[in-house]
Image (cartoon, rainbow, N blue to C red):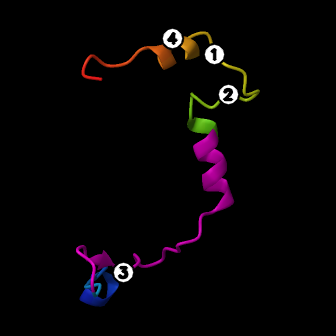
């Protein structure tokens, strides 16, 4: 692997963090198949939008440090 095939670190003027160049062979645009797979893999995503049996209890319960 040559050094031109790798990501590089770029300085951003006025920013506290550096930024990486895009990885070779990647794009910044999401692929529709990725979005569908992400939505299907989430167990909390209800298909009909109705509240579940524990939703109200989860909204009432707060950690002790609150």
Label 3 and label 2: CA atoms lie apart by 37 Å
Q: Earlier in the sequence, mark 3 or mark 2?
A: 3
Disc 2, SS: loop
Label 1 and label 4: CA atoms lie apart by 10 Å
Magenta stretch: residue 35 in it? yes
Q: Nearer the viewer, mark 1 or mark 4?
A: 4
Circles 2 and 1 in contact, beta carbons < 8 Å: yes
Q: Nearer the viewer, residue 6 or 45?
A: 45
Which mark, by number, is residue 46? Answer: 2
Q: Nearer the viewer, residue 55 or 7?
A: 55
Quarter the N terminus occupies: bottom left
Disc 4, SS: helix
Circles 1 and 4 in contact, beta carbons < 8 Å: no
Q: Earlier in the sequence, mark 3 or mark 4?
A: 3
Mark 1: few/some/many CA within 10 Å (<14, 14-19, 20+): few
Label 3 and label 1: CA atoms lie apart by 43 Å
Label 3 and label 4: CA atoms lie apart by 45 Å
Q: Is 41 on the left-hand or right-hand side of 32?
A: left
Q: Which residues are magenta?
A: 14-39
Please give the residue where the numbered disc 1 appears in the rendered image.
52
Query: For residue 40, what is the image quadrant?
Result: top right
Outermost right residue: 48
Q: Is 23 on the left-hand or right-hand side of 15?
A: right
Magenta stretch: residue 23 in it? yes
Residue positioned 59% across, 64% down in the render: 30
Residue positioned 29% across, 84% down in the render: 12
Which mark, by number, is residue 57? Answer: 4
Mark 4: few/some/many CA within 10 Å (<14, 14-19, 20+): few
Quarter the C terminus occupies: top left
Label 2 and label 4: CA atoms lie apart by 17 Å
Please give the residue where the numbered disc 3 appears in the rendered image.
21
């Amino acid at each position: 692997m040559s050094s031109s095939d790798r990501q590089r670190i770029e300085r951003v003027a006025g920013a506290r963090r550096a930024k990486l160049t895009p990885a070779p062979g990647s794009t910044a645009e999401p692929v529709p198949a990725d979005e569908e797979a992400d939505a299907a893999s989430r167990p909390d995503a209800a298909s009909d939008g109705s509240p579940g049996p524990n939703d109200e209890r989860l909204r009432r319960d707060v950690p002790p440090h609150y």
